[in-house]
Image (cartoon, rainbow, N blue to C red):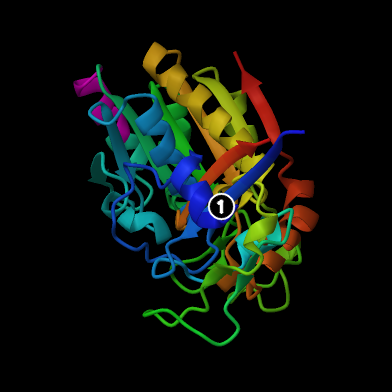
Amino acid sequence: MTSEDIIKNGSVVYSRPRLLNERNTHYCPGCSHGVVHRILAELLDEMGLEDKAIGVAPVGCAVFAYNYIDVDWIEAAHGRAPAVATAANRLNPENVVFTYQGDGDLAAIGTAETIHAANRGENIVMIFINNAIYGMTGGQMAPTTLLGQKTATSPYGRRADINGFPIKMSDILAQLDGTCYVTRQAVHTPAAVRKAKKALRTAFENAIAKRGTSVVEFVSTCNSGWKLSPAKANEWMAANMFEKYPLGDLKSI
Amino acid sequence: MAKIRGAVIIDQQRCKGCDLCVVACPTDVLQLQPKEVNDRGYHFAYTANPDACIGCASCAMVCPDACFTVYKITTE
């Protein structure tokens, strides 16, 4: 049996999600953003949220997220996505609001907005892409950069005495009474992608049921910033990032 | 015994040649084109060994650009 016969007679196991636009993404080859965009588009379609979802795009590599997923989007100022999402959710309680932020957005300039939105228990989903670097601006050190990790602004590796320690945002948010679900996932293997999608589904179900803030952190790669090939970046992440940012649910009520 | 066979269609113009599908494939179906490039200059993925495909969709799961359509059939 040839491939043509299988394609003609077989069943479709997987096809490009309907909610992803035809546009090519501007992300570097192998970027985790693409995978997260894809599972987000699949999930919004599966849950029938096409007309109900409102995304809030950040500043950072995902600044053009509104170009790729065919739902309603708002572009927020740097770090202010949770504040904008608060307004969108309070004015449109029947809609499902999510933010999509990187570590420079959520963990640096937007720390206050993030913590207070979570502390107020806004019924939003925060999608947090943690790749330990400022990808868009050229690979500078981020608050989540690991100790000893080399970046454009820490060429000899991050030092605790000068640069401080990497911040574990999800652990901080898990302590707050406003959050109902905090989890840390990755998208480096097919199994991890399936698990991450399940976690994202739980987060959206919480937002629909108005249980409080859900935070889904994705430990991600930035192969351009880390100066590794995409496959090597995944290996580096599994070997180094998971020690500091272990995967799994931090809070689930 | 029933045998599962699979096939993939790759959107070669969309592919950025990141190699993640090649690493993820459990049966070594996929390879990157060694010389040929697509319109955007990337060495795109192709099915070098299509008969080995089992339709597990691991390639589709890790693809950041959603280039894959995966088909599966069970034969006697």
Which amino acid type is marked by label 1? Ala
Q: Secondary structure at mark 1?
A: strand
Residue closer to the observer: A61 or A230: A230
Residue A210 in the figure: left or right of residue A160:
left
Our reading of the magenta stretch's main secondary structure is helix
Residue A160 in the figure: left or right of residue A127:
right
* Span highlighted in magenta in the image: A85-93
Identify the residue shown where x is 70% and y is 32%: A248
Give the chain of mark 1. Answer: B
Identify the residue shown where x is 61% and y is 31%: A183
**Vertical position of residue A3 compared to residue A201: above or below:** below
Q: Quadrant of residue A46?
A: top left
Residue A237 in the figure: left or right of residue A211:
right
Residue A102, x across and y down, in percent: 48, 51
Residue A96, x across and y down, in percent: 32, 25
**Residue that badge 1 annotates:** B7
**Vertical position of residue B69 compared to residue A28: above or below:** above
Q: Is residue A90 magenta?
A: yes
Q: Is residue A33 magenta?
A: no
